[in-house]
Image (tube, helix red, strand yellow):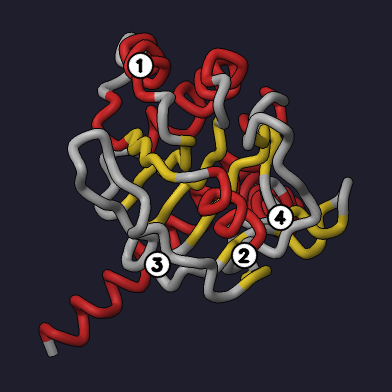
Amino acid sequence: MNTTDKIKKFVILGILFLLPITAYLFFSSGINHFAKLPVLTEYVLEIDQFKTENGGSKQLEDHITILCFFGNDIESSQANAFNLAHKIYKKNYQFKDFQFVILTPDGTQAQVKLLKEDLSQIENPENWNFVYGTPNEIEKIFNSLGSSYSLNNNMASPYVFIIDKDRSLRGRDDDEDLGILYGFDSSIYSEINNKMSDDVRVILAEYRLALKKYNSKREI
């Protein structure tokens, strides 16, 4: 066997050895990259009774929504908002039909204005949608999520939720730490940076794929 044949042999053996390992590392690098994000709760209540600062309304239906509850004391949620702005909003806010919705007690408009000014230093806050309602209305929406969490006395929660276009709560049913993961603790930077960022990519990829298939069928 000449030198060239020996080199070819070693190259082929190297590829056969490394390919399975590379594939394993690729597919195991993110637990949710190659599967749909599980539906944990169906038919989350619609939010069209809440009003924007201009008197309009927003809805969950037909949108991919990051749903947040910042409560009466907006300043206490500022660090959470910054974590979300840097790791989730900034990378995804221009995706069609993607939105942040923050259910906020009426009367917090001045606090929200200050927060949005701070958020604008990170990225254009056009898809940060603060909508206002009563504590009772906020609690009803929160309870409809069917999560294991609760609102505090200020009608706030550090947990934020992924709601799909059919108003279903998406999350994890096999999380390595908690088992069922209904929402993401926005006060924990690593959880937003790792788990939530991963899951948002999954659901956006899911809708990109669905749109691609739809457009392909129309062209046939």
153 to the left or right of 126: right
Q: Nearer the viewer, mark 4 or mark 1?
A: 1
Q: Position of residue 22 (x, y in %)?
A: 69, 50
Are the residues flagged by discs 4 and 3 in contact, CB closer than 8 Å?
Answer: no
Question: Could you say whether the residue bearing mark 4 is in a helix, strand or loop?
Answer: loop
Are the residues flagged by discs 3 and 2 in contact, CB closer than 8 Å?
Answer: no
Query: Mark 4 Cα within 10 Å, few/some/many (few <14, many 20+)?
Result: many
Which residue: 45% across, 39% down?
A: 102
Pointer 3 residue: 165
Q: Nearer the viewer, mark 1 or mark 3?
A: 1
Instruction: Determine the image quadrant of residue 166.
Output: bottom left
Question: In this orientation, which residue lies closer to the viewer: 63 or 103?
Answer: 103
Look at the image and tell me whether residue 15 can be seen: no
Question: In this orientation, which residue lies closer to the viewer: 95 or 188?
Answer: 188
Instruction: Determine the image quadrant of residue 107.
Output: top left
Q: Nearer the viewer, mark 2 or mark 1?
A: 1
Q: Is residue 188 above or below residue 155?
A: above
Q: Is residue 100 above or below residue 96?
A: above
Pointer 4 residue: 182
Are the residues flagged by discs 1 and 3 in contact, CB closer than 8 Å?
Answer: no
Which residue: 60% across, 64% down?
A: 37
Q: Is residue 185 above or below residue 17?
A: above
CA separation in Å, label 4 and label 3: 17 Å
Question: Could you say whether the residue bearing mark 3 is in a helix, strand or loop?
Answer: loop
Instruction: Determine the image quadrant of residue 144.
Output: bottom right
Pointer 2 residue: 144
Question: Could you say whether the residue bearing mark 1 is in a helix, strand or loop?
Answer: helix
Pointer 3 or 2: first along the chain: 2
